Image (cartoon, coloured by chain):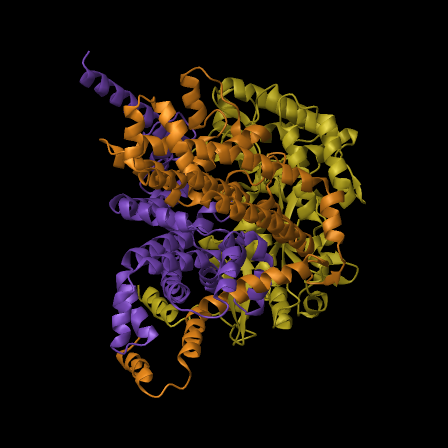
Chain colours: A yellow, B orange, C purple
Amino acid sequence: MKAARTYLTASALAIGLMSTSALAEELRFTVWSGNEAHLKMLNGIAESFKATHPDVTVKFETIPPADYTQKLTFQIAGGNPPDLGWMMEDAAPTFAKAAVLMDIGPSVKAAEGYDFGDLSQAAMGLWQDGDKVYGIPFSTSPFMIYYNKAMFDKAGLDDPLALAAKGEWNMDKFQEVAKKLTEANPGKWGFEFKDGEGYASRVMHALMPPIRAYGGDAWANGECGLDKPEAIAAVTQLHDMVFKDKSIVPPGEQGDYFSGNSAMTINQISRASKMPEAGFAWGIAPLPAGPGGESPVIGQAAIVVFDQGKQKDLAAEFVAHMTNKENVATMAQFFPPARKSVLETDTFINSNKLIPADQMKNLSAAISAGKVLPSHEKSPQIFAAMAPRIDGLWKADANVEDSLKAVCAAIEPLL
Amino acid sequence: MTETTLQQATARPKDAPWLSLKYREMLEAWLFISPTLIGFLIFFLGPLIAIVYYSMTEWNLLTQQATFVGLDNFHDALFVNPDFWHVVRNSVIFALGLVPLNMALALSLALALSRPFFGVVFFRTVFFAPVITSAIAWAIVWKFLLQGEAGAVNQMLAWVGIDGPNWLREPNWAMAAVIVTRVIKMVGLNMILYIAALQAIPRDYEEAARLEGASRWQIFRMIIWPLLAPTTLVIMVITTIGSFKVFDHIYQMTGGGPENGTLVLAYYIYQQGFEFFDVGYASALAMIMFVIVMVLTVVQVTVRRKGME
Amino acid sequence: MTNRQIRIIYRTCWTLALLIVAIPFVFPFLWMVSAGFKSVTEIFGAPSLIPRVWRFQNFVEVFTYQPFARQYFNSIYIALAVTALTLVISSLAGYALARMRFAGAGLLMLFLVSALMVPEEVTIIPNFFLIKWMGLMDTHWPLILLPTFGPHGVMATFLMRQYFLALPKELEEAGRMDGLSRLGIWWRIALPMSRPALAAVAIITFLFSWNLFLEPLIFLSSLEMFTLPLALSNFTDTYGLPLWNLQLAATTLAVVPILIVYLIAQRQIIESFALSGVKG
């Protein structure tokens, strides 16, 4: 109440409205999480930074995830850049190309006890350009199958974890169980795309796991891969599941996995925090393998420093602090790490209260073997060019091959 | 405004005038207008001039580098980029669907509600309520109502045996859905303008016609409709221009999709400028939009004058 | 059947027809409120206007997933600021345009009229850089300045001018005889006589600011700076997962108070819009 009154007074005087110019030693750090537990942990790390930098405070600012990249752009273009921030993999090349990210390589490599080589090379790929380091991943999170144990039991089926242990967890089996699950649970579905957004904002998250399992990719070396035979086979299978088997929640319908309306979904381990309130037995398993073998898909996010920030050297020091071994181990309770030393320890395997150790091992394996989602310096344009053509794909009578060819035709000039 | 300043101000004219009355009045007038005028110059006219320059640059929002490219952006829009004409087509379809539907419904409702009867206030209040509601809130709710099979609209259609389409997933249905929900949202405004105009028509005209044995339709056709002409023309042009401005409704309901089926000019400008960071091209689009709207305004002025005659 | 009976049947049919037409106008509001009390599962289940399970905690959780109270406050105070500012400057300018003779008045009018129709999408890009240059990104200033001085402010000016023109001049002339300055006449005589016009401008301006979307979308980036429409448009949890039922509960909280005020003062509000539409 008092704060509100103070604010009212301030705005009445038209002072509260002015851009709050940062204090000399305050670092602005944008994140997309508003989760209290996350922020508590982050503030703890900021607090420990005071051991070496007593005057420095870090202010974490939450920007909603859906508009994160865009709002960040507005801040940078608007002359009001944060000092540091989280960044998703699909935005990385755009920002690196625009030269708004600072090369933090020298800072972190020089930090005491940092051990730069401990960061997995696979995880660093996206954030390095020659000697330059544009970011340090703090979350290297593979896509996993979440399943509803009760619905599998009802259908009398082995769950994905058991199938994976037997080596039978592949795309064909995936289609088969999804169909049986749908039949055994009327009004519900076998599978839901990530967050139910597979036809809209999470198209890539829906398409990439099967395409990679078939050995394809979205694009590589300036060439579109979506109209290659591997991708066509993978997407045809998904299309059949949606429209022939009707085992995947179709466009325009809601079949929320977390509310018990779908037997399986794909998601990252951060969503495990939603499971306790879901009220059914569950587990996580690797993605189904395909003709291309096992091919885990990883969503990644890194900490970056903005080149226009006023205190970028200090910010870079904070990155080194935040991603040292100790703090990476701390963050591992929420964010799967990119440090080999942390990944291989039992501490990580046992770090998640919600997920049993044997399932965490699958996660660990996926991080080591996985490949990050596709990204490109023109990601926003590419995704926008894809969207209308992908819309055309998700119709019962669509010709998958033609639709994917249209997608490629639309994005090829941009690649 | 305190008493003292008022008194000081009031004291002046009694003293020897330091300016002749005419100039004094002029100065005062400009002072009265200056807040509006200065704000107008800074936030409206300045930007309008700036956009002419912007539209001739290649300018990335993120890198903040601008290079002069002459008329390339316009060339791109008009002759190279196939999306542009698609977007113009969508905007025209949107206007052609929205304007007649809005006006016909507004006039019908106004005719029904211009005379007092039991419940007239209730109906006016109901039909006007969406006008004061935020377009975002309105679009949020309709987006739910128009979901595939689970949506309330299709469930209701199912009761009467109609298998409704997946409204927001089919480009043509999505366009229809956006138009109709927009009409429902905004028709109340035109309705009250028509009601005001209808109430201004002297009753005797109608009475006289009725005494001569004219039917209701004849009275409407021969008396009311011609008398409404000025209002109709004004409403038509305002609604048409308004239809080019629709952004929030589409942003929330369809995001321009599916298959770019509802991507209209206002949204396209936003997308190019603020999602793809292509400031130059977006500015060229804004210029084109400005020209379109200005042409419509000139049409309005001409039409208004004719209406007056 | 007597004439009277025919008329009653006729009336009833009319009212029934109007009631059917009213469905799409009323149903969204009813559905919104009802869904605000439902769980996600029920929202997408069989439709009914009465929730099977009343989930009151939706309205509590709205305040935990986003700084909703703060966003609500932002919307209110910004709308009040825009309204106050618009009232002052539009009535000043409107008075001058109505009552004072000065060189350039005609040209100025033409100038301002042309602004009326230009959509804000046209000027938003240069305004983005202007606000950046002023150092006002992610503050509420652009949401106050742009609506006040944009086409909406011009509309308010014309509305005021029109009203002043219709006022009798005698009182003002008497005021001038008494030695009032122009400012004094405006403040003491013209404004008190223009309450209906001022009320109309206030109502329309408040709602205009309250519902503003494009400007907040572009100028605001921190959650606690958001205004209601922006907050509603993407009501997600911390992972970006849409919170359907909370979005509807939040929408209900944003819409219903305005709706209640509207129901109480519907006559005044509708007349305000009629005034603006005719003059605009």
Tell me which corner region of the image, top left, top right, bottom left or bottom right, holds residue B24.
bottom left
Question: For this rendering, which residue is in front, B86 or A287?
Answer: B86
Image quarter hosting the C terminus of chain A: top right
* Horizontal side of residue B287 vs C144, given as left or right: right
Residue B298 at least partly seen: yes
Q: Residue at x 49, y 67 (%)?
A: B37
* Horizontal side of residue B27 vs A285, given as left or right: left
Residue C78, given in percent of the width and then of the height, sits at 40, 60
Residue B134, given in percent of the width and then of the height, sits at 41, 46
Question: For this rendering, which residue is in front, C102 or A72?
Answer: C102
Instruction: Residue lying at the far bottom in this picture: please name it.
Output: B16
- On screen, residue B192 above or below A78: above
Q: Residue at x 35, y 59 (%)?
A: C165
Residue C100, given in percent of the width and then of the height, sits at 40, 69
Question: For this rendering, which residue is in front, B144 or A238?
Answer: B144
* Horizontal side of residue A54 vs A382, given as left or right: left
